């Protein structure tokens, strides 16, 4: 399993939100590219980057910060936030992004997601963010009536590299992963699942690792890495074992 350290960018800064609230942002680094270099030197295999402003506004907002990250490290970057049309997708793929994460577009324009998978095999992931068992979109501001599994199943066979499942209520709260919901989703799909939201300790990672065979490919971790609750070397060893 892969541990994806998160670099969430708001107003050009590396932050962590609490339960997806833009008003509840803690700044951990004024320079996202510097944070990328730090993670690169710690032994991680990937970076998970999100343009938070872009996710809300539906277009790239922190493009300069993302470009700086791409230039600061050789690690593959998984990027989400504000990628809702072909021009934006092509721009980032040509700029060196290894994997684009599409979320809101999956409901607004599902054909775009399928076409993206066809054009960029193995380089497109679907972000499914859930609040109280329903999919949230547009930077988590809008909650729909769609169930995460129903959305995931509608893209089975489309060629997604992975599905990133986030429990918004746990994101940034250090209350522990929603392992049960993540495992249930992964078990029902052939597409690999990446867990996200609420990692607080190595115990979360051990529990997730024990369920790897359900189809869990990795886990995204943010605040627990930034505040030292999780040691990178120990975490990487747990998941790679």
Image: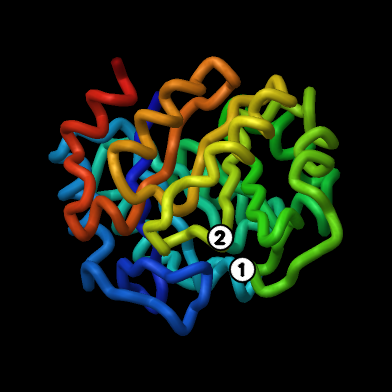
Residue 87 makes an appearance in the image: no
* Left or right of 106, for residue 222: left
Residue 99 vertical placement versus 20 (above, below): above
Residue drawn at (48%, 59%) of the image:
171
Residue drawn at (41%, 47%) of the image:
48
Of discs 2 and 1, which sits in the foreground? 1
* Left or right of 188, for residue 186: left
Q: Nearer the viewer, residue 135 or 59?
A: 135
User: Which residue does the numbered mark 1 point to in the structure image?
Assistant: 139
- Crowd band around label 2 with a 10 angstrom C-alpha radius: few (<14), some (14–19), many (20+): many
Residue 200 makes an appearance in the image: yes
Quarter of the figure with the N terminus: top left
Residue drawn at (38%, 77%) of the image:
25
Element carrying mark 2: loop
Quarter of the figure with the C terminus: top left
Residue 42 vertical placement versus 7 (above, below): above
Residue 171 vertical placement versus 44 (above, below): below
Residue drawn at (16%, 33%) of the image:
233
Q: Position of residue 5 (x, y in %)?
A: 33, 46
Earlier sequence position, callout 2 versus callout 1: 2
Q: Position of residue 193 (x, y in %)?
A: 58, 32
Q: Are marks 2 and 1 in contact (CB under 8 Å)?
A: yes
Which mark identifies residue 81?
Answer: 2
* Left or right of 156, for residue 31: left
Which mark identifies residue 192?
Answer: none
Element carrying mark 1: loop
Q: Quadrant of residue 46?
A: top left
Q: Position of residue 16 (x, y in %)?
A: 37, 66
């Amino acid at each position: 399993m892969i541990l994806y350290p998160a670099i969430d960018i708001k107003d050009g800064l590396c932050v962590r939100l609490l339960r997806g609230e833009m008003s509840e942002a803690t700044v951990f680094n004024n320079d996202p590219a510097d944070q990328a270099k730090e993670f690169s030197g710690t032994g991680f295999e990937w970076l998970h980057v999100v343009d938070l402003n872009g996710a809300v506004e539906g277009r790239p907002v922190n493009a300069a910060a993302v470009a700086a990250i791409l230039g600061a490290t050789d690690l593959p970057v998984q990027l989400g936030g504000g990628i809702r049309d072909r021009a934006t997708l092509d721009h980032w793929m040509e700029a060196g992004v290894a994997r684009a994460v599409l979320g809101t577009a999956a409901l607004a324009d599902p054909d775009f997601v399928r076409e993206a998978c066809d054009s960029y095999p193995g380089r497109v992931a679907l972000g499914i963010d859930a609040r109280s068992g329903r999919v949230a979109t547009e930077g988590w501001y809008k909650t729909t009536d769609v169930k995460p599994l129903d959305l995931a199943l509608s893209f089975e066979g489309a060629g997604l590299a992975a599905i990133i499942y986030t429990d918004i209520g746990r994101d940034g709260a250090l209350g522990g992963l929603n392992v049960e919901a993540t495992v249930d989703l992964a078990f029902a799909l052939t597409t690999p699942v990446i867990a996200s939201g609420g990692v607080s300790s190595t115990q979360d990672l051990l529990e997730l690792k024990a369920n790897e065979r359900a189809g869990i490919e990795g886990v995204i971790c943010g605040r627990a890495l930034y505040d030292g609750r999780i040691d990178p070397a120990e975490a990487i060893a747990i998941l790679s074992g």
